[in-house]
Image (cartoon, helix red, strand yellow):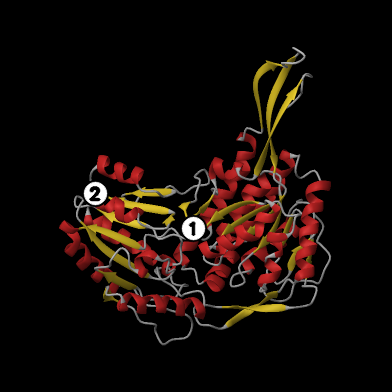
Amino acid sequence: MSPTPSGPPSTASPHEERLLIDGELRSAAGSGTFEVLNPADGTVLGKVADAGREDMLDAIAAARRAFEETDWAVDRQFRKRALTQLLDALVEEKDELREELIAEVGAPRMLTYGAQLEEPLQKFRWHIDHIDRFEWVRRLDDTVNRFTNEPSERWVVKEPVGVVAAITPWNFPFGLLLVKLAGALATGNTVVAKPAPETPWNATRIGRLIAERTDIPAGVVNVVPTSNLGTAELLLTDPRVDMVSFTGSTATGQRILELAAPTFKRTTLELGGKSASIILDDADLTQAIPQALGALAHSGQGCALPTRLLVHRKVYDQVVAGLTQAFQQVSCGDPQDQGTLAGPIISARQRDRVADYIRVGREEGARLAVGGAVPERAGFWVEPTLFVDVDNDSTIAQEEIFGPVLTVTPFDTDEEAIRLANASRYGLAGYVASASTERALRIARAIRTGSFMINGGSFSGGDAPFGGYKASGIGREGGREGFEVYTETKTIGSALSLPLS
C-alpha cells in the first residue's frame, strides 16, 4: 500500500475536507473553503477545501506527469490490483458513505440500496473484471506491401486517451463519479475529478481512500472540488487535458463543447432528459400506475426518470384517478426514513426553479390535480405534484424540471404515442406498459432514446451502456461501449513479426 501522504492531518470531522493532488491530501493553496448544506433542513453540515486556479493547474500537471512517467497506462494487471484495493476500501466504508450521501445529497435511504450506492459498487467490480476480457489487441489478416511485395502483419491496438476530466453533478454524485473513474482508470488513463460543489464529500472520501489505502500512483487520480466556475473551466481549456467526461445539464454540455473545441478534446456527455412513459390500453394498471410513481424518486432529481406520462384515452380517466390517489399518499419525507421516496430538493435555488415551473404549468392551462406547493419548513422542499390534461408542447412537458412533477397527456393510437414521445429535444430513456409483446417492442424500437424499459423491466448493470440521443448527450457510460470510449485506436502494419498480446 501507498504510505500515508503528507499534508495536514484529517480534522475531527467524519467527512474528508481536503483536496487530493499528486498523491497529497491538502488544503487549498489559498486556504479557501466552502460550506456543505443539509438539504433536508438547510443547516451547515461542514466545509470542504475550495480549489483555486493554482490547485487546478497543479492537479492537471500531476495527472499529465502520472500518465507519461508511471506504468499506469501500460500495466493492466497493476491497474486491476490497485482498483481492487480501492473497491475493497469503499466496501469497508460503505456504511459511512451511505450516511454521508443521505446527509449531503438528501438521498432517500432506500435509494442508497440501489442507484446511489450499492449498484455503483457492483458496476465498479464489472469494470475491474473487464480489464481481462477487453480486446486490447486484435490481429487483422496479413497483407502485402503493394510497393515492396513484402508480407505485412496488421494489428489494431487499444491505448488510453490520456488525462481525463471527470465532472459530476449533485443528484447521484457517488455513482456517477465511480463509473467515470472505473472506465477511465481501468483503461489506463489518469483523472482530475471535479465534483459538484453541493455534494463534494463522497468524492473527497474516494480521494482519501486512494491516497491511504491503494497503490494507485501519485497523480493518477486528483480530486478538486471548487465553487469557482472559472477554476472548473480550466479543465475544458487546458491542452494537457485530453478528454472530458461530464454528466449534468444540457446547457452546461453545450458550454463544454464550446470551450473544449479549440483543443479537440474528446467529450462524453450524459445530459438532460424528459423521458416519456407510455401506458397502452391493454396495460395492467395495477402495475403501471405504481410504476408511474418513479417520477417522484429522489424528488424527481434524476435525468432518466419517467416524468412525462402518455396514457391511452380508453384508460385515461382510470389512470388519472389512480395517480391522484397515489400522489396524495406520497409526502415529502425525511431522507433518513427507510420508506421515503421523495426527499428534499438539493438547494434553495433548485427549489425555486421547480416552483417556477409549477407556476408556468398553471398559467399555460394544465390542470393541477395534486400538490404544487412549497411547504413552509426548514430545508428545501416541493410537494409531489401531478399535472393532468397537459399539452405535449407546453413548457412543463418539454423542459426538464428536475423536481417531483409528473405531467399526464392523453393519446388515441400507438402511432400518436410514438409521435408525442419523440416530439422532444431529449432522448435519454423511455418506458411502455402493455400486455402485448409485439406492441411494446414496436414502440421501444420506434422511440429515439438511449435506453428503454418495458413493463418495469430494468437494463441496469455494469455491462449495460447508458446514454442518450439528441440533446441527451454524446457517447455512453458503462458496458463495453462505455469502457472503449476511454481508449484510442492505433493500427499497426509491420514487416516484422510482433509479439503483441
Nearer to us of marks 1 and 2 is: 2
Count of picture labels: 2
Work out which quarter of the rendered image holds the C terminus and state it. top right
Image coords of residue 349 (percent x, y):
51, 79
Instruction: Residue 108 in the image: state x and y as whole percent.
Output: 46, 68
The image quadrant of residue 79 is top right
User: Could you tell me which residue is drawn at 49 percent across and 45 percent down?
Assistant: 464
Report how far apart the C-alphas of labels 1 and 2 lie in the structure.
31 Å
Residue at image coords 38%, 67%: 296
Q: Which residue, given by chain and number where applicable, does mark 2 sit on?
A: 414
As drawn, the residue found furthest toward the left would be 314
Q: Position of residue 446 (x, y in %)?
A: 34, 45
Amino acid on which disc 1 is placed: Ala
Q: Which residue is mark 1?
A: 115
The quadrant holding residue 393 is: bottom left
Picture residue at 49% right of the left edge, 58% below the top: 115
Q: Amino acid at mark 2?
A: Asp
Camera sees residue 91: no
At label 1, counting other C-alpha atoms closer than 10 Å, the crowd grade (few under 14, some 14-19, many 20 or more) is some
Place residue 57 in its image quadrant: bottom right
Dot 1 and dot 2 residues touching (CB under 8 Å): no
